[in-house]
Image: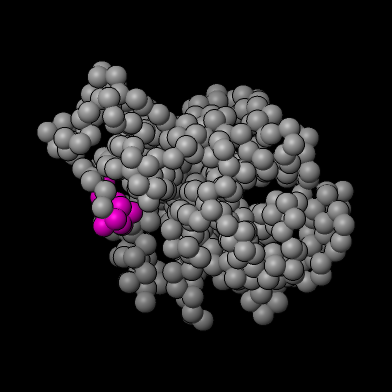
Amino acid sequence: MSPQQETYFFLGIGGIGMSALARYCFLKGAKVGGYDATPSAITADLEAMGMELIYVDHLSLLPEAFKQQETVKIIYTPAVPKTTVLFEYFNLHKFSMLKRAALLGIITADSFSYAVGGTHGKTTTSSLLAHLLDASGVGITAFLGGLANNFNSNLLLKDTAITVVEADEFDRSFLTLSPNVACITGTDADHLDIYKNIQSLEEAFEDFAKRVKPSGRLFVHESVQIPGTTYGLLETSDYYLSEIRYEHGNIYAHLHTPKAVFKKVVFPMPGTHNLLNALVAFAMAESQGVAVEKLIAALVTFKGVARRFSYEIKKENRVFIDDYAHHPTAIKAVYESLRSLYPIGEITVVFQPHLYSRTQDFAAEFASSLSLFNRVYLLDIYPARELPIDGVSSSWLLEKITAPEKALLNKKNLVDRIVKINPKIIVTLGAGDIGLEVPKIKAALL
């Protein structure tokens, strides 16, 4: 599909996945506009490119160019409520309306597609894969769920014959894709507001696995009970790592493939989970004939993804890291990464829970992961698409945490409290708007 000469209006255009599609359509020659409730650096960039954006949910602000039912396609995300005035208008007047995932499926249908699935690590793994292919000379287009530092964007647009996408399990979005090469990084329980139970989630991943083209290849983490080429830390896996070492600020491991062993490969990001993300990205690229030597060299030059174990301050007397982690498993992985790098010293965490339903479903697991830290500060729950759930709050979660020091803070007193304790190691976590507080914290601690 080519968006050339098409007209699109994106509901929720400031979202990381939506904005990548909006950029793609615009750069391919389409007329693009959109609505988002919150102005941001992303929306400012889209406007600077030439897109028409509005920030108030009112028909009077909708540009005339996007009111033509016969010619305008509406792209929406479940994050935008169907009760918004604009959604109801487009729906009532029978505009052509597509979910974000459906558009992604249409765009990539005729390409050789790499799809990264799993309940954790999709953005880091897909960004790694895109970088490895690009740095190895493979022309690709990549739609990413974060701002990859190598591209300074969530979109890499080169050769559209080969695409890299995230296969998002939320709302069963990944079932619109038909990849040639795919991976599943894990199937931990999540999005139980959609799936109701872990069995339903696992069945959806099985359905995703069946969507890999018959001539294609599926890679699965060794813990995933779905047939495929396995990867992990066990010698029984097809691709695995051994002899992991942290030396002089670098991370090394022996990388085993079905055909050879590559010793003391340098990996770009700390933490076992990130090493495994890099391993499966390597395996996906290597399986399609990309030279191993190029891939190993490219690993070293990966610069990470914004808000994925991102160093905001890295000094001898101060470390400040920001991360998107919003699930108990990811929070524990961040803690273990920090401890592997900084085995001594108190670690302070500021966490903004994301969604009432997720907080309720995993309260015990959140409490266990957060209790690993020496000092825990909670912000109020970021509701995103949800209404409050009776009895579910950050203060309710805080009671379950057993860290030596803990407190419920708001954004107004957050920076003052952090300055007062003067932490040597601090990390901010969450998928809501906690990222907006990061520059304030950084400025106060420098």
In percent of width and height, residue 27 lies at 37, 51
Query: For this rendering, which residue is in front, 424 or 211?
Result: 211
Q: For the point 62% across and 59% down, which residue is it?
A: 138
Q: For the point 29% across and 31% down, which residue is it?
A: 72
| Residue 408 in view here | no
In percent of width and height, residue 70 lies at 27, 25
Q: Is residue 42 one of those drawn in magenta?
A: yes
Q: In the displayed structure, does residue 90 sit left or right of residue 169?
A: left
Q: Is residue 416 one of those drawn in magenta?
A: no
Q: In the displayed structure, does residue 367 sit left or right of residue 84?
A: right
**Picture quadrant of residue 166:** top right
What is the residue that sits farthest to the left in this orientation? 60
**Picture quadrant of residue 200:** top right
In percent of width and height, residue 56 lies at 18, 39
- Is the C terminus in the top left, top right, bottom left or bottom right quadrant? bottom left
Q: In the displayed structure, does residue 383 sit left or right of residue 291?
A: left
Q: Is residue 318 above or below residue 102?
A: below
- Magenta range: 38-49
Q: For the point 82% across and 56% down, which residue is it?
A: 257
Q: For the point 69% across and 64% down, which residue is it?
A: 295
